[in-house]
Structure formats: C-alpha cells, structure tokens
Image: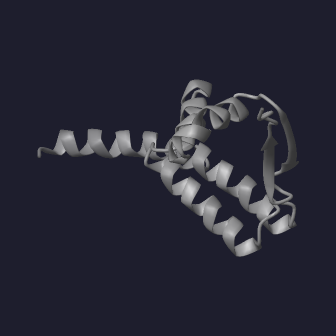
Amino acid sequence: MNHFTRIALATFSLAVLPAAWAAGPSAAEQAYQKERAHCMSGKSHQDRATCLKEAGAARDEARRGALGSKSSGDLAGNATARCNAQPAADREACVQRILGAGSTSGSVEGGGVIRQTETKVP
C-alpha cells in the first residue's frame, strides 16, 4: 500500500466512523429497551425473568433478520392446522370455532381463551 492510499484510507475512516458512532442504537436494540422497560414495570403479565428472556430472544432474532410479522393468512392457517390434532369427527367443529363461530370468552392474560359452540344431537 503506497503512502497516498494510506492517507486516503485514514481520511475516509475519520469521515465515516463518527457518523457510524452517532447513528445510535439499532431498531432491534430500541425495541429491546422498550420491551425491557415493560418487563421491569411489572405490567407484562409474566414473571420478570421470563419477560426479560423473551425480550432478549426477540432482539437476537431481529438482529439475525429472522423476526418478522406473519400475514393474517399465515396466522389463520396455523390456527386451523392445530385442528388436525383433533379426531376426524371433531375437526370441522374445531375449524368453525377458530374461524369465529359460537362464542369466545376469557383472555390470554387471564389464562386462556375459551371458544364454545353448541351442537344439537338428535
């Protein structure tokens, strides 16, 4: 490497590095800090250790580019696929409940969502 190349490289480094340092935390890190604050506030409806572990795992996945949002079609497909574990006679009723038939009560925070339908048997 000649003298001119070294000077050019050093000048470029001095111009670019401060901008990189000033960029601040990444979006993944900002989201993690927000989630961490939520965990520490006690409003997450999880114990603190679990909440912090989940927040850290989400940050790591986001850094790898593996954390994305699913489309509503993907989510519905996943929900109805769980009905495949039911006996064949109950599968259709399961799909109908997932798609909104019947009544829904409860909450995730309260321990579970209960979906209920009534089937009249002659």
At 72% from the left edge and 34% from the top edge, which residue is drawn? 97
Task: Please tell me which residue lies in front, 15 or 34.
Answer: 34
Quadrant assignment for the C terminus: top right
Q: Position of residue 53 (x, y in %)?
A: 62, 68
Total tally of numbered discs in the picture = 0
Whether residue 108 is visible: no
Task: Please tell me which residue lies in front, 23 or 4.
Answer: 23
Applied colour scheme: one colour
At 69% from the left edge and 29% from the top edge, which residue is drawn? 96
Q: Position of residue 84 (x, y in %)?
A: 51, 41
Q: Position of residue 18 (x, y in %)?
A: 52, 46
- Say above or below: 94 vs 40: above
The quarter of the displayed image where residue 47 is located: bottom right
Whether residue 27 is visible: yes
- Is 84 situated left or right of 76 in this image? left
- Is 18 situated left or right of 49 in this image? left
- Is 59 situated left or right of 122 in this image? left
- Say above or below: 39 vs 11: below
Task: Please tell me which residue lies in front, 28 or 69.
Answer: 69
At 54% from the left edge and 49% from the top edge, which residue is drawn? 21
Q: Position of residue 93 (x, y in %)?
A: 67, 34
- Say above or below: 62 vs 70: below
Furthest residue to the left?
1
